[in-house]
Each structure stands twice: as structure tokens, then as C-alpha cells.
Amino acid sequence: MPLRLRPNDPTFYDLFTESANHLVDGARILAELLGSTAGSGLSASQQIAVQMKDAEHAADETTHSIIRRVNSTFVTPFDREDIYRLASDLDDVMDFMEEAVDTVHLFNLDWLPEEVAEQIEVLQRAAQLTAETMPRLRTMKDLAEYWIEINRLENTGDAVHRRIIAKLFSGEYDALTVMKLKTVVDLLEAAIDAFEHVANTVEQIAVKES
């Protein structure tokens, strides 16, 4: 087995954990969004959009910290390209969640299909799992259960998304409402898909390091 030179510096693992914790915050804000569209008024929706924008900026700062660390570190804990990819994948999740919240606000939506709660539950579960998994990159142990569960959650998200789309195109809603709501649920679906990209990258890293 070839000798691998790997630093003991925990900074990268801490930063990936920090990045994943931002996603936990983002998913929590998404859950609050449901309440804002259940009669709390547009001012509440606007406040939540501001909260999410702040969370997205904080996530961006962590992503930039990871990139700066890679660029200034001679020996990284695993392949540089994988570090870049994982940082980007985590950032994509937050970007899609933030865009979904901002779209609800910009479209002045005062309600969402009840099935959106299921999409948000999937995102909350995926975010929590990701935050719990990032520290385990240090040992590369017990990671398989992560990508298996994320894949299961992504399949659940796909099924929920199909149900919502079928409902939107049932003829019950006018075309403009369908367009607005579809934009939101498609962004939430994209966030769920982005979690699968995170899991795939984690799997690739684990395979290379095994």
C-alpha cells in the first residue's frame, strides 16, 4: 500500500462541517417560510427572505474560506479537486434554497401547495445528515450509510415533486399561478438533487481514500 502524506490540520473538516451547518440553518428558515405563507402576510415573507439572504452570505463566506485554504495549503487532506467539488456542491444547495425563498417573496405568494412541506422535510433531514457526516471525513469511516440515505431521500423528493406537478397541472389553477408555484417547487427539487451531488462527491472521496 503506497504511503500517503496527509496533514493532521483539522481546518478543512471544520470548514466543511460549518458549511453543512449553514444548510441546517437554511432548511430551518425554509420551514419558517411555510408559516409566512399561511396567513402571516407579505411582511413576514420579506423578513424570512432577508434571513435567508444573510444565511446564504454566511455560507458563501465559508465556501470562500475553504477555497482560500486550498490555495494556501501545500498538502491537503484529500484531492484538491474533490475539495473544490464538495465545497461547490454544498454551496449549490444553499443557493437553490435561497432562490426558492426569494422567489416566494418576489412573486408575492401567500400560499404554497401543502406537499411543499414534504419537500422541506426532505431538505431538513438531508441537511441534518450532512452536518452529522462532515466530521467523519477525517476518519473516512461509516460514510456509506450517508450516501445511501441521501439517495433514498432524493427518491422521496422526486416522488413528492411529481405529485405536486400533477396537482398544479390538474386544471384547478390558472396559468400564472401554475407558473409561479412550479418555479418554487422546481427550485426546492433542485436543492434536493444538489444534496445527492454532495453525497456522490463524499462517496468518490471515500473510495479514493480507502
Image (spheres, helix red, strand yellow):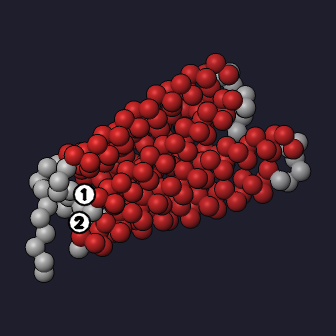
In the displayed structure image, the side of residue 111 where residue 70 appears, left or right: left
Q: Which percent across, then down, holds residue 33?
A: 59, 33
Q: Are marks 2 and 1 in contact (CB under 8 Å)?
A: yes
Residue in the image at 34% along x and 48% along y: 131
Measured as percent of width and height from the top left, residue 151 is found at: 48, 65
Q: Quadrant of residue 41?
A: top right
Mark 2 element type: loop
Question: Which residue is rendered at x = 11% and y = 54% of the image?
Answer: 8
Instruction: Identify the residue position indicated by label 2 in the image.
Output: 141
Total numbered labels? 2
Q: Which residue is nearer to you in this view: 125 or 182?
A: 182
Report the disc number at residue 106: none
Q: Which residue is mark 1?
A: 136
The residue closer to the viewer here, 175 or 12, is 12
Q: Is residue 204 above or below residue 197?
A: below
Between the C-alphas of marks 2 and 1, the distance is 6 Å
Chain-order first, disc 2 or disc 1 = 1
The percent position of residue 59, horizontal first and vertical second, equals: 40, 38
Inspect the image, locate mark 2, and give the three-letter code of the amino acid beneath it.
Lys
Is residue 149 visible in the rendered image? The answer is: no
Q: Residues within 10 Å of mark 2 (few under 14, many from 20)?
A: few
Residue 19, image quadrant: top left
- The location of residue 42, given as percent across then percent down, is 68, 22
Dot 1 crowding, Cα within 10 Å, few <14, some 14–19, many 20+:
some
Amino acid type of the residue tagged 1 in the rendering: Arg
Q: Residue at x 11, y 64 (%)?
A: 5
